[in-house]
Amino acid sequence: MRELSPEELLGELRESVELLAATPTQQEEWLHEHRFPVDELALQLDDEVPAWFPRLASAGLLTDDAQEALRDLNAALAQFSGSQNASLWTERALHDAPEWRKVRDLAARAFAALPCS
């Protein structure tokens, strides 16, 4: 398997963040299309942040502001992880839970801080 270029990594990161900034209906459609549970929305980002930061930063593709915005987004998702918060990892919660509204706001901020790929 070939290693992705920094530009390809940035593209994948932008897609993950854009999905987190999307409307609840768009998120549901993506989940159904890919047959994933709701937690996949967070797992994708968790795989990328901050593991990809060094490569993206050394390629000049990730500013300090973008890194901070991405860390804030990842931390917000982590705050409601765990079995005690299972009710927040449902499609209904995507529409109703204030935690998901906060995630969308943080994702929009992070997306705006990322360069176009």
Image (cartoon, helix red, strand yellow):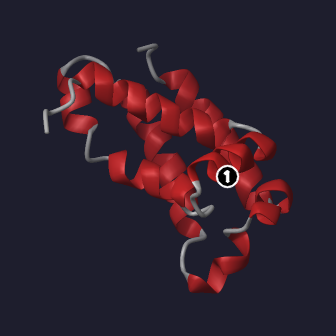
Question: Residue 75, percent across and down?
Answer: 50, 57
Q: Residue at x 35, y 45 (%)?
A: 48
Which residue ends up furthest to the top in the rendered image? Answer: 116
- Compared with 60, 19 (above or below) is below
- Compared with 65, 93 (above or below) is below
Query: Is residue 79 shown to the viewer in this render?
Result: yes
Front-lying residue, 32 or 81: 32
Q: Quadrant of the N terminus?
A: top left
Which residue ends up furthest to the right in the rendered image? Answer: 96
- Which element type, helix, strand or loop, lies under badge 1? helix
The answer to whether residue 101 is left or right of residue 62 is right
- Image quadrant in which you'd find residue 95: bottom right
The answer to whether residue 59 is left or right of residue 98 is left
Question: Residue 79, percent across and down?
Answer: 56, 68
Front-lying residue, 18 or 58: 18
**Crowding near pointer 1: few (<14 within 10 Å), some, many (20+)?**
few
Q: Quadrant of the C terminus?
A: top left
Question: Residue 77, percent across and down?
Answer: 56, 59
Q: Residue at x 44, y 48 (%)?
A: 45
Which residue ends up furthest to the left in the rendered image? Answer: 2
Q: Residue at x 63, y 86 (%)?
A: 84
- Image quadrant in which you'd find residue 80: bottom right
Residue type pointed to by label 1? His
Query: Is residue 49 shown to the viewer in this render?
Result: no
Question: Residue 25, percent across and down?
Answer: 80, 44
Q: Which residue is mark 1?
A: 32
- Compared with 48, 86 (above or below) is below
